[in-house]
Amino acid sequence: MRLAILLLLFFCSGICGLTFQVLWLRLLALVFGVTAYAASTVLAAFMTGLAVGSVLAGRVLARFPRPLRVFGVAEILIGFSALATPLALDAAAALYQRLYPASGESLALLTAVRLITGLVVLLVPTILMGMTLPVLSASTLVQGSTLGSRIGALYAVNTAGAVTGALVTGFHLIGSIGIQRSFLFGAAINVMVGVAALALDRAAPDIAADTVESRAPIEAKAAASASSRTRLPNAGAIGVVIAFSGLVALALEILWFRMLVQYLAATTYAFTTMLVTVLAGIAIGGAVASRLLRRDRDWTAVLVFIQLATALTVLGSAIFLGWSYEAGWRTSGEWQASAVAILPATILMGLSFPIALHVAAGSRSHETAAAVARRIGRLYSLNVVGAIFGSLLGGFVLLPLLGTRRALIVMAAVYGASALALVAGHPRKGKLFVTVGAAAVAFGFVAAEVPDPFAAAYKRRHGLDMREFWREEGVQTAVSVHASEFRRSLFLDGLHQANDTPEMVRLHRLIGHLPMILHPAPDDALVIGLGGGATPGAVSQHRTRVQVVELSDSVRKAAAFFAHVNYDVLNQPNVRLRVDDGRNFLMLSGEKFDVITADIIQPTHAGAGNLYSREYFALVRNALKDGGIALQWIGHRPASQYKLIMRTFLDVFPHATLWFDGNLMLGSTHPLTVDPATLASKRSVPLTASALDDIGLPAFDTLAGWYTAGPGEMRAYVGSGPILTDDRPLLEYHRSLPADDEPLDIASLRGDVRSILK
């Protein structure tokens, strides 16, 4: 009964751990940006804390030999320290803003600052989180002949809690109650878990015995019998397996996510589904391992078979996903695709970790419970450190150098190689080498059949109409250019971003031209997002210095294929490009602009909520010079989404106006006044006049016809209601919005252009 209660408490602890991780990654992205370098730095800081905590667990138990009490206190402290992280992050943001100018745009220095700042913010709660599993492994409820089985059970229920935390936070909490209240939710559960653990310890004190053997001689005898079958390899071999398991698991997670966004829309729900599937597989595997470890087996040999099976399963799942998707199966759904590509391999991963811990720690009955905890802590830290390197290796080395397909094959092969480390020290190495050899042959045949996920995905979407003629799987995103007889298209992570059809080019150019022709004399302009380059290309045709901020360097390279519609923007002498997060640039650069505009960014895509919140629009307003103009594309979308964006924009820009059939909003620092003479002046420049002719703007009457409404009409249309904030990114988490949304009707949204004429 007490063990069941402990498992329930550790399940709830897992809920909090993933809840906080999701919230931290989101908040830290607001400070550091959403570049791959910033995201990996934050993840490294998080996991470093876990590794340190797992190493410290044994030392803490040596001083306080009450595992349940230590666990209870740790859970309470996790709750309170996690609750304080938003305040710590505010201080970190202020520090980061002060240090940023001194970096000189050095990526190495910025990464160091992000790592140190992230560590400072997350250090206390993550160290405490890292202690929990090793500490509980020393409990009298866990120790004994079934140590390996019970550690497997702890691992499984904690991961199952993580599944629940990721699901609840990603699908419900953030959209429904917001980030701050989600922190309160997680902290409250942590504190309740801690109090319950302290009560459990008080009811029956959980004092770690001097040795496992002295506490349970009968169990120790059984453990010794089991150890004769376990065939313990040398410590170095099991350490290699555990470290490489962590490395490959995180690298594969990155590779799976990159592969699956070619088949699925890159929404926050898709990424949450992938994460949940990874964790669910590990939880299932851990639960199975917990039951299997009660039996007497040669667990080292079993671990060899599992490592080999994982290698083959990683590739087999990729083959099946590509084949079934191309055949038109329902593997185009988030859950179906994730289950096919990820679940089988992660179940095997979940099996292997408890078995490896059992092999390393479950058969040494002469050690104290604290010593067992120290060893499990060291092994767990090896797994976490391997995971840190895996996240860096997958995103920064494997994807850019090898691409998704070959990187999957290489990482799968590492699992096979780790099996060799176990075989080398095994008494029956001869038979096991035969097994490894057979698996290697099978691996070669399977690897040859792994499809290119890009080819499989695009073939179903476009058939033979579109062919790929350029692609780069960069650090930030996978970018490709496709062409048919009639158009050329740009795709980012499988999503259509731009093409060279006249309608699309005109809209993108208009996003650049409109604020430039309404501002009387802009000297400096900022464009957030390069895309195909038509928007900044249009801005470049005015007598203006143009700063473009683009998140992905691969997009910069792709823009060259659209030089025929973007005025060869990157070779214009008045244009400078910076590869960076646009919001981060606004927050940190301190530069001021007369005009700020942005490429089309769909607000429901993952991470896009950061560019539609009140806080983002405030950054834009603060970066405008006096008399400056900002343009925001809104697009025609469901009514609730449309009103959310407009209401938020009006909250920051009370003098906003609406243009081009309700597609474009203009914000200004003062009430907008339009002078017909301004357009005539701009058309006196031949380069600008030619560019304006390209979008069909020969005279002021045309411009006046583009006017839709003023601030009064806009406010009356949207009415009162919620706005988009960093705390509640309702559009990115759009499933929290009403399901029966009414279609957009802007027939009543009409104003008189004469109200803004000079």
Image (cartoon, helix red, strand yellow):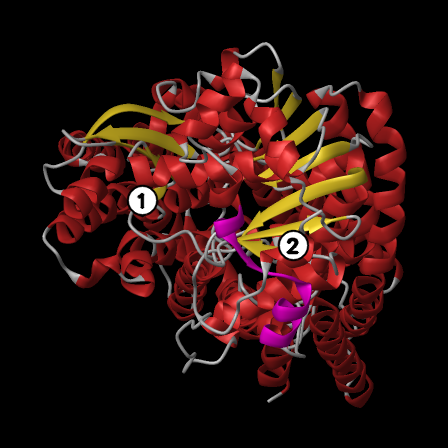
| Residue type at numbered disc 1 | Gln
Disc 2 crowd, CA 10 A, few/some/many (<14, 14-19, 20+): some
Left or right: 117 with respect to 447?
right
Q: Position of residue 100 (x, y in %)?
A: 82, 29
Residue 64 seen: yes
In terms of depth relative to the viewer, which is nearer, 398 or 452?
A: 452
Residue 217 seen: no
Residue identified by numbered label 2: 26
User: Is 708 covered by the magenta stretch?
Assistant: yes
Q: Distance from label 1 to label 2 (Cα)?
A: 23 Å
Rendered position, 208 above or below 565 = below
Residue at (50, 64) in percent of width and height: 152
| Residue type at numbered disc 2 | Arg
Label at residue 516 = none
Q: Which residues are magenta?
A: 704-717
Q: Quadrant of residue 366?
A: bottom right
Disc 1 crowd, CA 10 A, few/some/many (<14, 14-19, 20+): many
Residue at (82, 52) in percent of width and height: 89
Residue identified by numbered label 1: 262
User: Is 747 covered by the magenta stretch?
Assistant: no
Q: Quadrant of residue 409?
A: top left
Look at the magenta stretch and give its main secondary structure. Answer: helix
Left or right: 624 with respect to 17?
right
Q: Position of residue 251 (x, y in %)?
A: 46, 38
Q: Position of residue 525 (x, y in %)?
A: 67, 29
